[in-house]
Image (tube, rainbow, N blue to C red):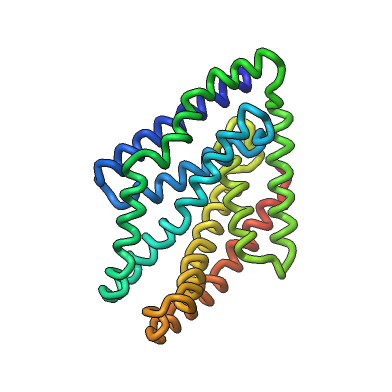
Amino acid sequence: MAFVDSLVAQLLRCQVVLWEIQARLQAETDCEALHDLRIQLRRLRSLLRPLRRHAGIAPLYAAAAELGRLTTPWRDLEVLIAHLQSQGLRHASAAREAALQSAYATLRDGQVLAPLLALLDNSPATLRNAAQQGQLPGSKKRIRAYLHKQRKQLQMALADSQSDRHRLRLLTKRVRYSNEMYARWSIESAATMAALKVVQATLGDWHDLYQWGQRASREADLQPLQPLQAYWQLRANQALAAVDVPLHHLARRLAKPH
């Protein structure tokens, strides 16, 4: 299958998933729709990122990135509310529920997703036309070079004991999702992909706790909850300690020939 055919097939799969998520949002059928939306946006951006400077790709990549930025605080709020409810802090969770419902309403009206879906509608014809004119800079060689570059960046970050954990989390996600979306040309073994997933999950746990601590320093109703803040700090420290072993394992996996 030609590169452009593979790319178009992936974009169509992303579009179908986004339609399904939009239907779930509008029907209010479950509480995972926003989370699944963000995962699909990450996958779409990972697919497009190696080609994001191409004229036919740039608007689509920008739309996916903007929707990702828009929904980040909404997902953070959703996770925080669920945690506050699990701790029996109904007043604190209720105080944030209106903002979350407003975010859901914005997603349900379809206008937020509409620009991205419209670009996805037009992308097959745009990309095939570009390929026919020899303008699409996509090939196995180009994608492999990109995957190697992302792998090298992650290796360098893992080798630096002072690496920022936020950046490590971003690089881990980038390597994992890029290799998933370009599975045909992936340079990572199944064991390495599993190690990436473990590191991403562990750093994700730490990230949530860190974000909650930051919010507690800014949001008045959380500031008096000293036991909860202490609990978050303890758990954040534990999560950081727990990630050392998976990070070491991932570094060893990446050091193996591929």
| Residue 219 x %, y % | 43, 76
Q: Can residue 244 be seen by looking at this rendering?
A: yes
Please tell me in which quadrant of the rendered image residue 131 appears.
top right
Please tell me in which quadrant of the rendered image residue 128 appears.
top right
Residue at horizontal 46%, vertical 35%?
A: 115
Residue at horizontal 51%, vertical 63%?
A: 202
Instruction: Judge by depth and name the residue closer to the eye, 147 or 84.
Output: 84
| Residue 84 x %, y % | 33, 71
| Residue 91 x %, y % | 27, 75
| Residue 241 x %, y % | 57, 73
Q: Is residue 33 above or below residue 90?
A: above
Q: Quadrant of the N terminus?
A: top right
Question: How many numbered marks does the figure carry?
Answer: 0
Residue 172 shown left or right of residue 24 in the figure: right
Q: Is residue 229 above or below residue 166?
A: below
Residue 32 shown left or right of residue 197 in the figure: left
